[in-house]
């Protein structure tokens, strides 16, 4: 039954992607002289469609939850509008388009050369042989592997001063909503996207699986950032990252500092599963909802920018400062 449902949605998505590509994208590609990029255009159509469906889900499901049980009244709507702009740029394909024609293209060439030289691929799903539903099992395995990689990346963003200089932009939002997930410095996004792409190629994740893995992670993160008072209870919070669990990660003096000191570190780095935080002792399951932001915003009035361009500029300034603190 479950597999039939998955097959239905998979087939429906593939049909919709093909129709959009053949009716809009392909004619446009030929009109602008980009007929040699049809494979790339078809993949881009899939990413655009996934992003569009995510935004529809956010507006139809998560937004009503924010109105139903808001944690705080948003006193700065313009700050939220900036986050909406970040989300549209990422989810509707502009960021992915830039990555396709720059870094990811080079990555494809590099791995192609490695394959010619006989460089092996570690097919993680082959580690679980003899399972009837191989497709579902392999997807779950890849999801767990990707979540661990995301945990390691997130720890790095909070551990190294230069990386934190970029990632701090994400934590500077004092009015967290479902749109906050994509509030990132472009260099931070590029580093993360490249690391995940390398891992995907190393362990044998197919293009369709990669899109699904990213889509699930993004929607879950939208929900985690929502202005919505919600936890999954004592045991549920230990199975999947809840809005309460993740809000503590964004809380001033808690989520991005170690043991209350003004040093990099923090708690609750998990993206989907809190298991890694529990395993590496970075979990905080406190039943509280604290104000979000960064200590130096509140105590020193440090400026992180009020619009997209100033935020990106200030991120670069922080990156090249002699010293960067939390």
Image (cartoon, helix red, strand yellow):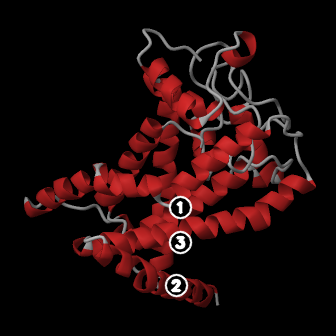
Q: Earlier in the sequence, mark 1 or mark 3?
A: 3
Q: Are the residues flagged by discs 1 and 2 in contact, CB closer than 8 Å? A: no
Q: Are the residues flagged by discs 2 and 3 in contact, CB closer than 8 Å? A: yes
Q: Earlier in the sequence, mark 1 or mark 2?
A: 2
State the image coordinates of residue 155 (x, y, percent, origin top left): 51, 33
Residues at marks 1 and 3, CA–CA distance in whole angstroms: 8 Å
Give the labeled residue for mark 1: 92
Name the residue located 49 percent from the left edge and 19 percent from the top edge: 318
Q: From what the image shows, is residue 72 above or below residue 325?
A: below
Residues at marks 1 and 2, CA–CA distance in whole angstroms: 16 Å
Residues at marks 2 and 3, CA–CA distance in whole angstroms: 8 Å
Q: Is residue 183 shown to the viewer in this render?
A: yes
Give the labeled residue for mark 3: 49
Q: If the image is split into quadrants, where does the C terminus sit?
A: top right
Q: Is residue 175 left or right of residue 194?
A: right
Give the labeled residue for mark 2: 16
């Amino acid at each position: 039954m479950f597999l039939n449902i998955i097959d239905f949605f998979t087939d429906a998505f593939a049909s919709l992607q093909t129709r959009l590509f053949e009716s809009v994208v392909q004619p446009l590609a030929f009109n602008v002289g980009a007929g040699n990029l049809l494979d790339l255009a078809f993949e881009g159509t899939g990413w655009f469609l996934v992003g569009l469906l995510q935004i529809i889900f956010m507006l139809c499901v998560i937004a009503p939850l924010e109105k139903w049980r808001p944690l705080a009244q948003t006193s700065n709507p313009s700050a939220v509008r900036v986050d909406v702009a970040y989300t549209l740029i990422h989810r509707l394909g502009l960021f992915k388009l830039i990555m396709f024609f720059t870094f990811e293209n080079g990555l494809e060439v590099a791995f192609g050369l490695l394959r010619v030289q006989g460089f092996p691929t570690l097919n993680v799903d082959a580690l679980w042989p003899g399972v009837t539903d191989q497709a579902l099992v392999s997807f779950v395995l890849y999801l767990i592997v990707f979540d661990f990689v995301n945990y390691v990346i997130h720890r790095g963003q909070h551990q190294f001063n230069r990386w934190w200089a970029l990632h701090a932009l994400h934590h500077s939002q004092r009015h967290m909503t479902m749109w906050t997930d994509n509030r990132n410095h472009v260099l931070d996004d590029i580093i993360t996207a490249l690391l995940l792409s390398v891992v995907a190629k190393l362990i044998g994740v197919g293009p369709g699986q990669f899109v699904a893995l990213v889509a699930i992670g993004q929607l879950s993160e939208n929900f985690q950032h929502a202005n919505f008072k919600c936890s999954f209870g004592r045991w549920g919070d230990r199975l999947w990252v809840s809005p309460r669990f993740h809000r503590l990660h964004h809380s001033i003096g808690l989520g991005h500092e170690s043991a209350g000191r003004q040093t990099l570190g923090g708690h609750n780095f998990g993206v989907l599963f809190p298991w890694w935080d529990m395993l590496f002792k970075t979990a905080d399951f406190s039943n509280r909802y604290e104000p979000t932001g960064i200590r130096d915003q509140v105590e020193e009035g440090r400026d992180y920018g009020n619009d997209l361009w100033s935020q990106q500029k200030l991120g670069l300034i922080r990156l090249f400062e002699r010293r960067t603190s939390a």
